[in-house]
Image (cartoon, coloured by chain):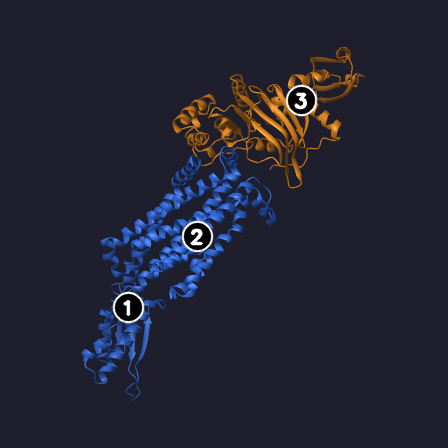
Chain colours: A blue, B orange
Amino acid sequence: MHNILLIAKREYLERIRTKAFIVATILIPTLMAGGIFGTAYIADKTKSNSHIAIVSSQQPLSTDLQNELEHGKDSQMVVDVVPPTPEIRSELDAKIREKSREKGIDGYLWITPSTSTDPAARPTFDYTARSAADIVTNTTITDALRVVLLREHLAHSGLQPASIATLMAPVEVNTIDVGGQRGSSRNSFYVAYVLFLLMYMVVLLYGMNVARSIIEEKNSRIFEVLLSTIRAEDILAGKIIGVGGVGITQVVVWILAAFIITASPLAAHIAGATAMATISATQGIFFIIYFALGYVLYSSVAAALGAMTNSEQELQQLNMFLMIPLFFCLMMLPVITSNPSSPLARLVSLIPFCTPLLMNFRVSLSMPQPWEIALSIVLMIATIYAVLWVASRIYRVGILMYGKKPNLPEILRWLKYS
Amino acid sequence: MPIVELQHVRKAYDTKIAVADLSFRIEPGSMFGLLGPNGSGKTSTIRMMIGITVPDSGTVTLFGQPFTRASLTRVGYLPEERGLYKKMKVMDQLIFLGQLHGLDATTASKRAHIWCEKMEITDAVLKKTEELSKGMQQKIQFIAALLHEPDLIIMDEPFSGLDPVNAVLLMDTLVDLRDQGRTILFSTHRMDQVEKLCDNICLIHNGHVVLSGAMREIKSRYPANRVALNFEGDASFLNHPSIESSKNYSGRAEIKLRDGADPQALLADAVTKARITRFEVMEPTLEEIFIEKVTAEYGEVNTGSKVDA
């Protein structure tokens, strides 16, 4: 035990001190915060604030449209309404070419009344823009026109303005979970998704780190010194604990950062409701449990892969053994998202290699039965034990083989060697 | 009681036999040379002695007891290739390796500082290992093997990568340790390097013992029929009838005499033809003995395909 801790301590301290660790630990929450606030900020900014002119003689259509564009839900434009005179077009064209933003305009909308006698016939709308790629302004104008025309049509049909306002108010859907608690489905989905990706990333990253550190020791031949005092099993266990400790440290820092970011008044202030995706205590606890189990499982597999290979390149050819289960989990996400308690979702979340990701995902979406959680943990521990047994045997023999790639019969023979 | 005793040890990897029926014993306080060309089974033998691998058959006895891992804290091992963590600082590394051998951190640190001073690498202790030269790293590896004051010191190719000055420093340190009563096992293919150091040797080739015993006794078995000769001028005396074979490196000749030939006669002939600046009659070197033995037993000296596992 003393030796396991020594190895673990060394792995942990050496890794925590690296610049890469510090950068990743600080950078990811920074990006996370930047992402959340940035999106909220950009969403705010993408409200079109262009300055356009409407050329129309039609009232009230042009003033309605002006009103909608200046004070509508998604737009904050500056709109001038001008009557169509013969020289106006060249005047507006000149304004479009104007370099200074204050004096110029971004475009003008020319409304030509319909010549048809049909009352339902619509006018023609021609929008001349400084930039044909200004999709936001274009879309905003289109949306505003639709609203204005609809409102006008409804008014023509004899509806009262109050009824029109009610009809056109946006609809909100509240999601209520099985426990009767009011929540937001978007919110729980985002949290689950973020946790899933976090776990996916960390398990893959630190699992591979175990493999890499074994290869590094193989190449530096340090293990010869280590093996001349301690047992291979101890080295393996120490490595998994040490590298895993680094992963857990990083994840804890990230989760704390997530708490602080989402709980800060600043977040609420800047982003409003958009940033309110918080992680509940239950989600946090299960995340840590499944993360630890998943990490041990995948890093044992990685340790075996590392012991079998001699270089990073060779490892890369074998790391599909780590990737395939993870990709499978990724593919199963839609199944679980649409119905977290379907038989298929229950089945795949009990496969030990998928449990850490999928069961955790289900926990975040809607709580599975307690027996499912218990069974999944038991199955995982049993699998971890089996994989560790195999990995330590491969490690013990594989680590002494260099230069030569083992084939399958050889690996099977290593398992018998005790 | 011998410190190490190997009895009929055998180890095979797949179809390749690395060590075939090897037996030897190392007495306490002696310097033992395990010699042989590349791929002769030296490293495989050492690995079985320290429990990295297990022999297929035969027994390994350490400190008078059958092999147990507990006795490994009394062994210091310097592997053939440098085995150090590249990114770790030298002092941290030494302390870590000391702790692995059962020392506490304070003792390890104290001893490491003393050793670094002795090995003249005090300036390097705060640097990362990868920033150091090969020779420096070899010295660190050397210290790491000695920190826990082992009774048995195993050195696999200790002088590789060292310049002559540092090689002498290492050699002197090892001689001191031997004089303090430690037992030292050398494994090397550079037979000339250990010739003057070792009390006993075991020469192996392709996993078989070629020659083993006390160095003095082995040497005395061979007559002093080698001549080293430095000269200026005519080299025709190299055709003298007493010479069996000779090599002439422009003014420095290495000569092997025929059995029973008198070196005096050769000297007399040489003096008349060339100006002699050196004339020395010697015993054959270990390397020459090895080549002679192997050629006699196996025909050609086959360096063999390298088994490094």
Disc on the earlier residue, 1 or 2: 1
Residue linked to disc 3: B286
Image point (32%, 52%), residue name: A284
Q: Amino acid at mark 3?
A: Leu
* Co-location on one chain, circles 3 and 2: no
- CA gap between label 3 and label 2 equals 61 Å
**What x and y, as percent, mark residue B84?**
49, 34
Q: Residues within 10 Å of mark 3 (few under 14, many from 20)?
A: some
- Marks 1, 3: nearer the viewer: 3
Task: Tell me the quadrant of the picture where the N terminus of chain A can be found.
Answer: top left
* Residue drawn 28% across the image and 82% down it: A113
Q: Is residue A57 visible?
A: no
Query: Quick one: which residue is furthest to the right in this view?
Result: B241
Quarter of the image where one finds residue A91: bottom left
**Disc 3, SS:** helix
Disc 2 is placed on an element classified as helix
| Residue highlighted by disc 2 | A380
Residues packed near mark 1 inside 10 Å, few (<14), some (14 to 19) or many (20 plus): some
Residue at the (61%, 22%) spot, across then down: B194
Q: Say which amino acid is labelled 2.
A: Met
- Is the residue A336 above or below the residue A110 in the image? above
Residue A95, labelled with which disc? 1
